Image: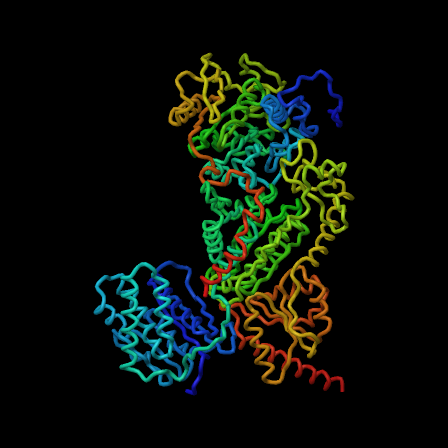
Amino acid sequence: MSYLKPLFKHPRLPKNKLGYTLKEYEGSLSTLCAGCGHDSISAAIVQACYEMSVEPHKVAKISGIGCSSKTPTYFLGNSHGFNSVHGRMPSVATGASMANKDLLYFGVSGDGDSASIGMGQFVHVIRRNLNMVYIVMNNGCYGLTKGQDSATADQGSKSKAGSINPFQAIDLASMAIELGASFVAQSFSGDKQQLVPLIKAAMQHKGFAFLNVISPCVTFNNNPGSTKSYDYVREHIEATSTLDFVPEMPEIKASYESGQSTSLALHDGSLVQLNKLATDWDPENRISAVNALQQARAKQEILTGLLYVNSEWKDLHGVLNTYHMPLNRLDESDLCPGEENLLSINASYR
Amino acid sequence: MKQAINDFIVRFANVNGTGSASANFLFAKTIFRMGIPVTPKNIFPSNIQGLPTWYEVRVSEKGYLGRREGIDLMVSVNPQSMAQDIKNIKPGGFFMYDSTKKLPNEYLREDVHYLGVPMMEMSNEAFTDPRKRQLLKNIIYVGALAKLLKMDVAAINQLVKEQFEGKSQLIQANMAALQLGLDYAEKHFKFPLPFHLAKRDLIGDKILIDGNTACGLGAVYGGATVMAWYPITPSTSVAEAFEHYCQEYRVDPATGENKFAIIQAEDELAAMGMVIGASWNGARAFTATSGPGVSLMNEFLGLAYFAEVPAVLIDVQRAGPSTGMPTRTQQPDLLLAAYASHGDTKHVLLLPSTPRECFDLTALSFDLAERLQTPIMVMTDLDLGMNDHISEPFHWEDEREYDRGKVLNAEELDHIGKFGRYLDMDGDGIPSRTYPGTHPTKGAFFTRGTSKDEYAAYTEDGAAYKRNMDRLLKKWDTAKSLVPKAQIYQEKNKSEIGMMFFGTSQFSAEEAKDLLAEEGLHLDAIRIKAFPFGEEVGEFINSHRIVFVIEQNRDAQMRKMIMMETDTAPSKLAPVLNFDGMPITADTIKSEIIQYLILEKEQDHELSKTTV
């Protein structure tokens, strides 16, 4: 791998509405393992932000700890980033959002960060419907500490050391719907065709947008017997557009069965075109979405695509009825009641 | 018993959840309105209904606001605690009780005067509604006390009218109950008691308020917009007060929108995370908690220290360790707070001792947090937070501007060349920061709890790490000049012995100082208001032979911090400790100091004998 990022920029690189090229949305060179699924997700975020013409500095990237949580360094270099503590990204994002409702918040987390140490915060940020994009880069293992099983590892999956995971996997997407997340999607790091539009839709959604993205660990979860290994995945590859070299997940074929197309309107009126959706399931119906996920689980499939969306629920700012201007822009004249009021407060305690 | 005007202690023994709090407050507030210094203290269980609770009121013409030993009058309406309550009265004292039922013989003490008032019977006769019967029973004893202690009845009536404004039925019922008590006492007892009240003008423009309300109000005035908290005794009323005053002063009249965001978090970890996220993003944010919450927040405090994010935490301390005594007071979190989190960390502490200081220091904490880009912890305690105290009134200079610290705007970023988030440009250890969203191409950086260089890039280079850690120490030195200076009680030292205290120990320590002076022992005194210690603290210690460090915890935590931070020899600092969960008293301080000095003398004596 190379250690320096080339500064060269092709003069005829296409530009978006703001006049920015893709380069303006990139970050530092990744230090993750070559071929890591996470880098593909970072690339999809870069692509989505470029295509959506967001001002890079109007985005805040917040993460916890782990391989996934390192990625905010590798995209949107002109955005502020906050690599906080393990499992606590949701609370930092909540505070940040309260301070400035005008920024777009990307929360990046992993399966250890969200499904184990940070489960409590994950649950409660859903409950509050915080207006943010929450991406879990889900590889079923702890990469940064060399491959221990995580809480999303499939039961029966074999680790690199040879042990069989005896525990049931936590299904973050089902759980998110159950808890009342207003936007839930599932995808695969290798499926950029699907991932980019999903991220774009998540960015447009006003409320908590959750993306559970399966992202294989090339180094520690790539052995025979692992349900997230290259070989196992390759055997199950379905015809799909693969822009990345990282292999597909086997279960993906299930979500591709239907060629039907449907479109969904988001809060701001934009449309999401859905092409990989099972025919008998309505992503605006929570019961239908949960049912479809349960059925897929029974068949050992992973459903990808937009699973559930609700554009009606108020986000946290709506619930708290916060001021239309960001709170961090208010000054003494807005915030301090002054000496005259203090005199009457004093009088009320005499 | 000799006559005593405005100098006695009344303790009320009630059952939790029976409405005694408002009757007892009525008693204390009337004395306040009579212009007499008064200090009420709640001694309550960790329980909502049914357990014993006490309310102790000290009246002090001399203005001593600390606790004092010795109960002159016990008002007992709780059979559960009666046996103990009778034992606690000082010889010659009085015992008022509900004589609806006859007092068992074993409760009779020869050296105590008994004042039986059939409160329940009277209340049942006068009122029909069961809830009212229970509530007004308490007002009946206030009426009896009014007669016995020469309370200003007009002042009581006025307070009742204020409390039940617009509810004329309730005002009438309360007035009737008061009169019942007054009449009963007039008919059955010799009045007034040897100790009683006389109107004075000793209060001036002071107010009677609890510290938690003052902290919440200080946060409103200090410009806090985001509050995240998790319910925990004894800090909860800070959040309640903040919300109350935000509703009053921070709702936009045109739109009805809130210029604040209050979040009840899922736990203290999340509460602190929210504070850090909001502060990072340029809002003034704070949390309020107690010791167990600070334990949970340690991880985030370390992050805020190392990543240099402002944060304000109000720690209303209670007795630990672990769940400890959740409704009892102590100052046990100093070491926890000062050095919170793993690695080399130090945090700024502010130590208020009155509601006025709760207000001032909470407002100031936001300036300090943003100036120093680090957590600031306001260390109050249950006694200060939940009890009403007579305090100087609040004051605010309307021209006062918030110190938002070193924050670069877009224009400044255009002119500075390469932005170094952790670059010390001014030599004070404080670098400049930027808020997210400031500039399209400049000023973005990555905030992290990992080591970084001056430009916020991740590094494992030992030299860069060390430079950063050394700069944080330089910032710590800068903090010393920014935090409030200690209060020194004398212009020039008058004694070779000093006393040092902070927070709620102030009242009793000052009283002890006077008591010792009355016996010919003059002590110099210093009250610490902040950590890190300013130079004046070291100078005070150096210029005295011995310094008594008065505090309310077992391990003499302030004494240890002084030893560590000022390199003072342990032998020079004598601990004076109180940690039974009750506010420290002047008697304790006085007797411990005397005892220490006697022992010291004996030792010196023996030493000289052996050397001879």
In front of the other: B352 or A124: B352
Scheme of image coloration: rainbow
Residue B115, given in percent of the width and then of the height, sits at 32, 79
Location of residue A71 in the rendering, given as x and y in whole percent from the top left corner: 63, 31
Would you identify the image quadrant in which residue A326 lies? top right
Quadrant where the C terminus of chain A sits is bottom left
Residue A182 percent coordinates (x, y): 45, 30
| Residue B543 position (above or below residue B601) | above
Residue B175 drawn above or below residue B89: above
* Residue B105 picture quarter: bottom left
- Residue B439 relative to residue B81: left or right: right
Residue drawn at x 58%, y 84% is B518
Q: Quadrant of the N terminus of chain A?
A: top right
> Can you see residue B181?
yes
In front of the other: B165 or A310: B165
Quadrant in the rendering for residue A278: top left
Residue at the image position 59 percent from the left and 19 percent from the top: A247
Q: Is residue A223 visible?
A: no
The outermost residue toward the right is: B463
**How many numbered marks appear?**
0
Residue A41, position as x, y percentages in the image: 60, 25
- Tell me: residue B98, above or below residue B134: below
Q: Nearer the viewer, residue A225 or B609?
A: B609
